[in-house]
Image: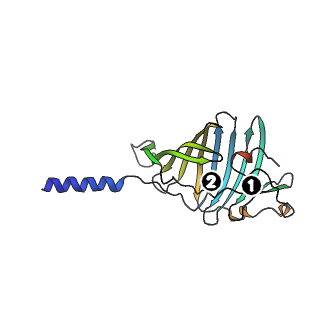
């Protein structure tokens, strides 16, 4: 009887510790890099993320289709507007933002691939415990396969690997993350954007940010 109770307790403990999909902090700042398989895309960016007010700021530099670019953008999902601008040229494009806000999270229907230690587990501070998840999600007009890796503690994003037939593999790596907003003023469009008129173009998503440099 005692053995049965012990076995039952161990079973319940294992079930309780099974990782579940999680949501990243509502306020977050940091950097990320992006590279793609077919489009020859290389990006380095700093970003601020505010899930409470559904807004994102990104400042990117990189190359796309053998052309270099420098982009700053503010995506205001509640207002349905994106500002894409250049401080250097003092130019600004205002475009409709017709896609829904996507929080930094592991989708609820994701499947757990495994739990591993990045780095080393032989001593304190030598590694970090992470969960890897996989599944499918709509990404622009196509459905994408993905694998997402986040920290067990805090659900901090580390990497996202996506695949679609249209673009092939797309790898995003996150680093230098800070919980909170380092500079909330980044969400305020520059003064020279006040004169920008809304341009009715193709709906904005992550990829066509690189096709419309200002």
Q: How is the image coloured?
A: rainbow
Q: Quarter-wise, where is residue 16 in the image?
A: bottom left
x, y (%) of residue 33?
64, 44
Total labels drawn: 2
Above/below status of 16 relative to 137: below
Residue 200 falls left or right of residue 171 = right
Q: Which residue is identified by label 1?
A: 73
Instruction: Measuring from the top left, give residue 196's x and y in whole percent.
Output: 85, 60
Category of crowding for the residue at label 1, using alpha-carbon neighbours closer than 10 angstroms: few (below 14), some (14–19), many (at least 20): many
Secondary element at image label 1? strand
Image quadrant in which the N terminus is located: bottom left
Toward which corner of the image does residue 121 lie, by quadrant? top left
Q: Residues within 10 Å of mark 2 (few under 14, many from 20)?
A: some
Q: Is residue 189 or residue 195 the one in the foreground?
A: 195
Q: Relative to the observer, which residue lies in front, 187 or 136?
A: 136
Residue plotted at (53% across, 53% down): 156
How many angstroms separate mark 2 from mark 1 (CA)? 15 Å
Rendered location of residue 139, percent (x, y): 62, 47
Q: Which mark is residue 208?
A: none
SS under mark 2: strand
Query: Residue 49 location, x and y as percent?
Result: 63, 59
Q: Nearer the viewer, mark 2 or mark 1?
A: 1
Residue 84 lies, with reference to residue 113, above or below; the image says below
Q: Return the disc, 2 or 1, that comes first in the chain's sequence.
A: 2
Residue holding disc 2 = 30
**Residue visible at 45% across and 47% down?**
111
Residue at coordinates 69% horizontally, 38% vertically from top-left? 41
């Amino acid at each position: 009887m005692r053995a049965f109770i012990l076995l039952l307790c161990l079973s319940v403990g294992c079930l309780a510790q099974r990782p579940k999909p999680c949501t990243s902090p509502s306020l977050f700042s940091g950097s990320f890099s992006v590279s793609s398989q077919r489009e020859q895309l290389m990006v380095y960016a700093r970003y601020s993320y505010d899930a409470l007010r559904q807004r994102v700021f990104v400042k990117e530099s990189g190359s796309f289709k053998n052309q270099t670019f420098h982009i700053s953008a503010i995506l205001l999902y509640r207002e349905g507007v994106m500002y894409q601008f250049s401080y250097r040229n003092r130019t600004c494009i205002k475009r409709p933002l017709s896609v829904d806000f996507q929080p930094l999270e592991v989708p609820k229907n994701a499947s757990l691939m495994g739990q591993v230690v990045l780095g080393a587990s032989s001593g304190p501070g030598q590694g970090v415990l992470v969960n890897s998840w996989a599944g499918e999600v709509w990404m622009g007009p196509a459905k994408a396969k993905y694998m997402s890796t986040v920290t067990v503690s805090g659900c901090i994003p580390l990497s996202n690997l996506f695949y679609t037939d249209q673009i092939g593999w797309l790898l995003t790596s996150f680093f230098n993350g800070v919980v909170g907003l380092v500079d909330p003023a980044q969400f305020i469009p520059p003064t020279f954007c006040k004169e920008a008129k809304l341009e009715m173009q193709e709906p904005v998503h992550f990829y066509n940010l690189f096709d419309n440099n200002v």
